[in-house]
Image (cartoon, grey):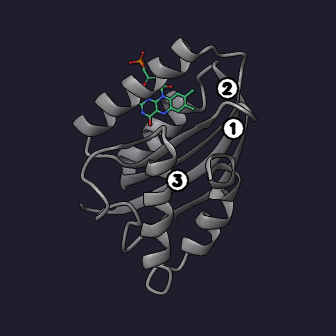
C-alpha cells in the first residue's frame, strides 16, 4: 500500500429498516473488497448508530469518504474520530476482507484483536473506547 491512511467516524442512521442496513453492508463489502479498503462497519439497532473504520490507500479512502459516504442521505450527524496516516493499519492483519460485524462473536473477536495490539498501535485505545457501547450491547 503506497500511503496507508485511516478514517474513523460515527454517524446516526436516518430511519433505516433492516433491509436498508443490509443493503449498505452488501455494497460496502463488495466495493471495499474490490478496492482493497479494510476496516469495519458496525451498526447498532438500539442506538441507530454507525461506527466505521476505513483503512487503505490515502487517495482511495479520502475519495470514498468525501464523494460517497459524506454525501449519503441515509445517515446524518457524521462525527469524525480521526483522519490520519497510519504506518501499521489496525485491521490490516485481522483479515484482508472488509469486516461485517453483526454478531456478538464477531464483536468479541474485534475486541480481542484490538487488545492484542494495544501496545503496538498508538490509536487502538481510542478505537476501543469508541467501540465500547457496541460491545456492551452485545455482551
Ligand atoms: C454509514 C455508511 C457507510 C458506508 N460505507 C461505505 C463504504 O465503506 N464503501 C462503499 O463503497 N460504500 C459505503 N457506503 C455507501 C455509499 O455511500 C454509496 O451509497 C455506495 O458507495 C454506492 O455508490 P454509487 O451508487 O455512487 O456507486 C456507506 C453508506 C453509509 C450510510
Residue 20 picture location, percent across and down: 54, 14
- Residue drawn at x 63%, y 56% is 131
Residue drawn where x is 48% and y is 23% of the image: 24
Q: Among all residues in the image, which is located at the extreme bottom?
A: 119
Mark 1 falls on what kind of element?
Answer: strand
Disc 2 beta carbon < 8 A from ligand 1?
yes
Q: Earlier in the sequence, mark 3 or mark 2?
A: 3
Q: Which mark is residue 7?
A: 3
Q: Is residue 130 left or right of residue 5?
A: right
Above or below 118: residue 11: above
| Residue 76 higher or lower than 55, as above or below | above
Q: From mark 3 to mark 2, how far is it between C-alphas?
A: 17 Å
Q: Which residue is mark 2?
A: 75
Q: 132 or 33: which is nearer to us?
A: 132
User: In the depicted view, which residue is nearer to us: 90 or 58?
Assistant: 90
Q: Quadrant of residue 85?
A: bottom left
Q: What residue sits right under mark 1 in the picture?
A: 11
Q: Are marks 2 and 1 in contact (CB under 8 Å)?
A: yes
Q: Is mark 1 within 8 Å of ligand 1?
A: yes
Q: Tell me which corner region of the image, top left, top right, bottom left or bottom right, holds residue 10.
A: top right
- Compare residues 84 and 15 and report the one nearer the observer: 15
Name the mark nearer the viewer: 1 or 3.
1
Gap in Å between the C-alphas at discs 2 and 1? 6 Å
- The quarter of the rendered structure image containing the N terminus is bottom left
Residue sitting at x 68%, y 54%: 136
| Residue 132 percent coordinates (x, y) | 67, 59
Question: Going by the picture, which residue comes out furthest to the front?
Answer: 139
> x%, y% of residue 90?
41, 66
**In the structure shown, which secondary structural element does the residue marked by tag 3 occupy?**
strand
Label 3 or label 2, whichever lies nearer to me, is 2
Amino acid at each position: 500500500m503506497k500511503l496507508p491512511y485511516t478514517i474513523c467516524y460515527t454517524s446516526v442512521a436516518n430511519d433505516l429498516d433492516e433491509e436498508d442496513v443490509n443493503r449498505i453492508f452488501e455494497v460496502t463489502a463488495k466495493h471495499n473488497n474490490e478496492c482493497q479498503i479494510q476496516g469495519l462497519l458496525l451498526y447498532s439497532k438500539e442506538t441507530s448508530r454507525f461506527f466505521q473504520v476505513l483503512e487503505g490507500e490515502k487517495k482511495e479512502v479520502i475519495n470514498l469518504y468525501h464523494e460517497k459516504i459524506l454525501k449519503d442521505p441515509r445517515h446524518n450527524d457524521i462525527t469524525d474520530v480521526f483522519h490520519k496516516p497510519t504506518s501499521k493499519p489496525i485491521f490490516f492483519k485481522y483479515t484482508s476482507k472488509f469486516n461485517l460485524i453483526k454478531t456478538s462473536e464477531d464483536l468479541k473477536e474485534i475486541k480481542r484483536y484490538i487488545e492484542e495490539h494495544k501496545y503496538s498501535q498508538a490509536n487502538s485505545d481510542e478505537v476501543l473506547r469508541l467501540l465500547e457501547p457496541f460491545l456492551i450491547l452485545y455482551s
